Image (cartoon, rainbow, N blue to C red):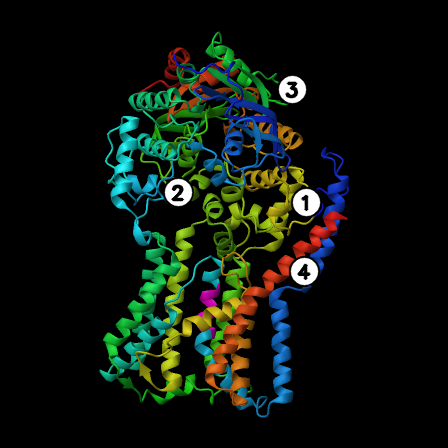
């Protein structure tokens, strides 16, 4: 079936000889290219870093440390899931950390006012959903670019967070919930804390959506060539709107996780986190221009940045240097595929010349 | 009356000699020569795709010829870019001028070369006075201080011409400047151009309106398929002579339209209007019929079919598929009703180039390829493989990006992705543009077979032989309106082109046919 135009191409009238030889050569090249796939390479790199850490850094391989290291990435990891889908669809949301802060501030303020925590959570999630819908509405109905819209709402949501809670800090959240979010309590028999266990489940779901459903197919098409997707009957605006809404919702949930993990609700929680999330996603090989990437790659990107930060902390490297390392990684991740592509083109040109 | 006699003049101001230019495998210009003389207006005629734009861009320094020479005052020159051509005194006025909307008329004219005062400050008074002087010289009443935003296209062109004057252009090239102008605006433009010509400028004028060519110009160069047909004085020629030079091809046996029995109406378009783009377009397409929508580029054909399919929103009117009205502005509704559109622009609209062949083919049928939103890969691959085989697609793997295929094979993928939806009405917009002759014949045979099987086909095409060879009926658009409906027997290159260029005699005759065919409300 694959070779519809292949060997038994008697009915095809175009001169096939030369073209066919070229196609075979292209096929062989592609096998190497698949081995060099960015997300595969990143997975290998992650394993290497883990092994090196276990061998070279004392205390790294201890389960308590691994639990803590994993849990430290919880918010980033959670938000990275819808962010990956957004970026694949050619969009981005820079307001996620502000939404995290707003959710945290709101939770603190309501807790302070004596609300039941069971009621606070759905309210925060609704606010996140509304914030995401606002982003999506501005992008799809008003037609503004996602970057511009979410730079605006980045400021707006953070401002609202300050309005809600001022510069207070609210603590003393119920112990059961705080325990749930803590790295000290893990899924029985493993070193996986609950927020990360939840993330793992959601990651599988997101991977299925992106790589196995028609919505995922549509996201890739929108990101790669929005007009062609629209011409093929893809409901472009609806999909974008839903993705922004999901991102807002997840960011608000991450705000609650953050609040519980640190036992502190503050308006300035998670400042700058959006950049780490996007850095992780891009490091995971998701193309910022849309249309390319895998969810597995993005997860590997999140874990790699988390593990590296943990290793650097264990080795007493300062926070500032950690930020520099993240920055360098990001540049490398953006540059490397380009370098590979350019090298590939050169090789192709050489092949064509001979 | 004061036309400088080119016979006595030594060298043309600007000339092309044996210029050849190819884009990939497409030979846009094949050994074309052209001479422009001071004080003379010369016309450039040819069908869509004859190479006129390439020639103009070569003069403007946008393209460099593959072979042949550009001569300026008889000496060979090489333009490394539009700036070089402008420095040589060549000004090009395009159909739709590109002014900075938020800058004033004066600032637009002197953009980048404003007169300066001390400390490199722009001398606004000098800019304004110089602009006022230019506009006076052109005899037009425009405020130099007003912003370019909101100027009519005619006024924008005047601004472009003033800009050309300001750097003492000796050659004025105008690419279909009158396409968007009213009668009076055209008169004013011609008066300005005539004045410049008398001052000694060489003018190259491109227009599909033959009457304008005869009105403004003294000689004409005709191109066909990138080659020079004739370069001659207009005196003694008739419009029909010119049309014959432009089209004069033999209809080859490429077009294999079978005679089919037409069935009931599959697609009906009633008074469809999109403000400023097309107006009051009504027609119908029956099962088993191939209807061609002909016209010049910019006549609004693609816009009509895009509104029919719902990717653009119509402002008024209805589209009915088998009697049921479609929701406006919804491609999904159109697809559900059995419409399919193979769009004009493969790269932007037809395919997602980065995605694989199979994903592109699957994109139109995602809801049928699995359950509950899940896509079954086997079904996806089967659909793609099936259609690839039926259309004799040449490919290496179905997982290859669509972008690696040749143009003709890409077009087959677009056809596959739409035929896989099993449409009732297939709309194809320029189905064979930019593809090789072999694939072209395959596409024609395919369309013919599909019509024979009872599909209703609406085909937009700028390729006249294709229109005449394939269509059972030809609808002709001119400036956003349907101006003619010609049954197969009456459709000739002359009659279609006459209607498309809005020539009055032909329109009168064909308007009657159009009214008959539509049963006007």
Residue B297 in view of the camera: yes
* Residue at image point 51% right, 41% down: B81
Question: Between tags 3 and 2, which lies in front?
Answer: 3
Direction from residue A237 to residue A221 in the image, left or right: right
Residue B470 in view of the camera: no
Q: Is residue A117 above or below residue B325?
A: below
Question: Which x, y percent locates residue B351?
Answer: 54, 45
Dot label at residue B395: 1
- Which residue in the protein does label 3 denote? B253
Dot label at residue B330: 2
Question: Between tags 1 and 2, which lies in front?
Answer: 1
Q: Is residue B500 within the magenta segment?
A: no
Dot label at residue A33: 4
Q: Does dot 4 land on a helix, a strand or a loop?
A: helix
Q: Is residue A179 above or below residue B481?
A: below
Q: Is residue B271 above or below residue A107?
A: above
Residue A253: quadrant of the picture: bottom left
* Residue at image point 30% right, 24% down: B185
- Specify which label sits upstream in the sequence, 1 or 2: 2
Question: Between tags 2 and 4, which lies in front?
Answer: 4
Q: Chain of mark 1?
A: B
Q: Chain of mark 3?
A: B
Q: Chain of mark 4?
A: A
Question: Which x, y percent locates residue A117?
Answer: 30, 81
Could you confirm whether marks 1 and 2 are on the same chain?
A: yes
Specify the farthest residue to the top: B236
Question: Between tags 4 and 1, which lies in front?
Answer: 4
Q: Distance from label 1 to label 3 (Cα)?
A: 28 Å
Q: Are marks 4 and 1 in contact (CB under 8 Å)?
A: no
Magenta-highlighted residues? A77-84
């Amino acid at each position: 079936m694959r070779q519809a135009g292949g060997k038994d191409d008697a009915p095809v009238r175009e001169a096939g000889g030369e073209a066919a030889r070229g196609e075979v050569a292209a096929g062989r090249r592609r096998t190497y290219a698949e081995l060099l796939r960015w997300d595969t390479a990143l997975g290998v790199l992650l394993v290497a870093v883990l092994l090196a850490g276990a061998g070279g850094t004392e205390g790294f391989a201890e389960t308590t440390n691994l639990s803590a290291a994993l849990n430290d990435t919880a918010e980033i990891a959670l938000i990275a899931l819808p962010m990956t889908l957004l970026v694949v669809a050619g969009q981005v949301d820079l307001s996620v950390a502000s939404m995290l802060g707003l959710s945290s501030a709101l939770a603190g303020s309501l807790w302070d006012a004596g609300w039941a925590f069971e009621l606070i959570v759905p309210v925060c999630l609704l606010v996140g959903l509304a914030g995401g819908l606002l982003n999506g509405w501005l992008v799809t109905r008003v037609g503004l670019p996602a970057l511009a819209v979410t730079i605006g709402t980045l400021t707006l949501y953070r401002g609202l967070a300050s309005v809600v809670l001022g510069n207070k800090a609210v603590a003393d959240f119920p112990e059961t919930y705080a325990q749930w979010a803590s790295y000290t309590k893990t899924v029985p028999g493993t070193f996986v804390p609950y927020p990360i266990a939840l993330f793992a489940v959601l990651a599988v779901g997101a991977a299925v959506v992106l790589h196995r459903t028609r919505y995922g197919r549509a996201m890739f098409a929108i990101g790669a060539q929005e007009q062609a997707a629209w011409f093929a009957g893809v409901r472009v605006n609806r999909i974008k709107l839903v993705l922004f809404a999901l991102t807002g919702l997840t960011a608000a949930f991450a705000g609650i996780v953050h609040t519980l993990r640190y036992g502190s609700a503050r308006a300035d929680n998670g400042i700058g986190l959006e950049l780490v999330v996007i850095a992780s996603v891009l490091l995971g090989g998701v193309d910022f221009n849309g249309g390319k990437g895998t969810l597995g790659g993005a997860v590997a990107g999140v874990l790699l940045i988390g593990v590296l930060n943990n290793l650097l902390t264990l080795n007493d490297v300062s926070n500032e240097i950690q930020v520099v390392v993240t920055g360098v990684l990001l540049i490398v991740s953006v540059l490397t595929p380009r370098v590979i592509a350019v090298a590939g083109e050169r090789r192709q040109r050489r092949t064509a010349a001979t | 009356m004061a036309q400088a006699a080119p016979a006595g003049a030594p060298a043309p101001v600007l000339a092309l000699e044996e210029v050849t230019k190819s884009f990939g495998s497409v030979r846009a210009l094949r050994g074309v020569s052209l001479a422009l003389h001071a004080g003379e207006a010369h016309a450039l005629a040819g069908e869509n795709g004859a190479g006129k734009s390439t020639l103009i861009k070569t003069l403007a320094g946008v393209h460099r010829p593959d072979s042949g020479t550009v001569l300026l005052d008889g000496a060979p020159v090489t333009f490394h870019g539009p700036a070089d051509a402008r420095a040589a005194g060549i000004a090009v006025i395009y159909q739709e001028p590109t002014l900075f909307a938020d800058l004033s008329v004066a600032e637009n004219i002197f953009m980048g070369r404003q007169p300066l005062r001390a400390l490199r400050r722009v001398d606004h008074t000098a800019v304004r006075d110089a602009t006022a002087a230019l506009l006076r010289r052109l005899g037009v009443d425009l405020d130099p201080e007003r912003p370019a935003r909101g100027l009519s296209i005619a006024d924008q062109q005047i601004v472009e011409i003033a800009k050309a004057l300001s750097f003492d252009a000796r050659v004025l090239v105008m690419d279909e400047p009158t396409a968007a102008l009213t009668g009076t605006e055209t008169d004013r433009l011609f008066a300005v151009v005539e004045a410049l010509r008398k001052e000694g400028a060489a003018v190259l004028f491109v227009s599909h309106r033959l009457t304008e060519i005869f009105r403004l110009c003294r000689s004409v160069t005709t191109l066909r398929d990138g080659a020079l047909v004739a370069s001659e004085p207009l005196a003694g020629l008739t419009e029909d002579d010119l049309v014959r030079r432009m089209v004069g091809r033999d209809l080859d046996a490429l077009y294999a339209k079978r005679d089919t029995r037409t069935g009931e109406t599959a697609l009906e378009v009633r008074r469809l209007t999109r403000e400023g783009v097309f107006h009051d377009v009504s027609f119908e397409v029956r099962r088993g019929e191939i209807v061609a929508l002909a016209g010049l580029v910019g006549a609004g054909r693609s816009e009509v079919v895009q509104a029919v399919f719902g990717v653009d929103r119509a402002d008024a009117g209805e589209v009915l598929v088998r009697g049921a009205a479609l929701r406006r502005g919804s491609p999904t509704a159109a697809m559900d009703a059995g419409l399919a559109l193979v769009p004009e622009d493969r790269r932007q609209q037809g395919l997602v180039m980065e995605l694989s062949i199979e994903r592109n083919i699957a994109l139109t049928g995602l809801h049928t390829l699995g359950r509950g939103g899940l896509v079954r890969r086997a079904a996806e691959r089967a659909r793609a493989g099936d259609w690839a085989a039926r259309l004799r697609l040449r490919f290496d793997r179905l997982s290859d990006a669509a972008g690696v295929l040749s143009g003709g094979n890409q077009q087959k993928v677009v056809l596959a992705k739409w035929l896989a939806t099993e449409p009732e009405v297939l709309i194809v917009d320029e189905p064979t543009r930019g593809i090789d002759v072999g694939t072209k014949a395959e596409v024609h045979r395919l369309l013919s077979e599909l019509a024979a099987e009872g599909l209703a086909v609406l085909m937009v095409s700028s390729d006249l032989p294709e229109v005449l060879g394939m269509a059972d009926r030809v609808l002709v658009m001119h400036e956003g309106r349907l101006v003619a409906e010609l049954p197969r027997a009456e459709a000739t290159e002359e009659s279609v082109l006459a209607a498309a260029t809005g020539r009055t005699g032909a329109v009168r005759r064909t308007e009657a046919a159009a009214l008959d065919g539509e049963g006007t409300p």
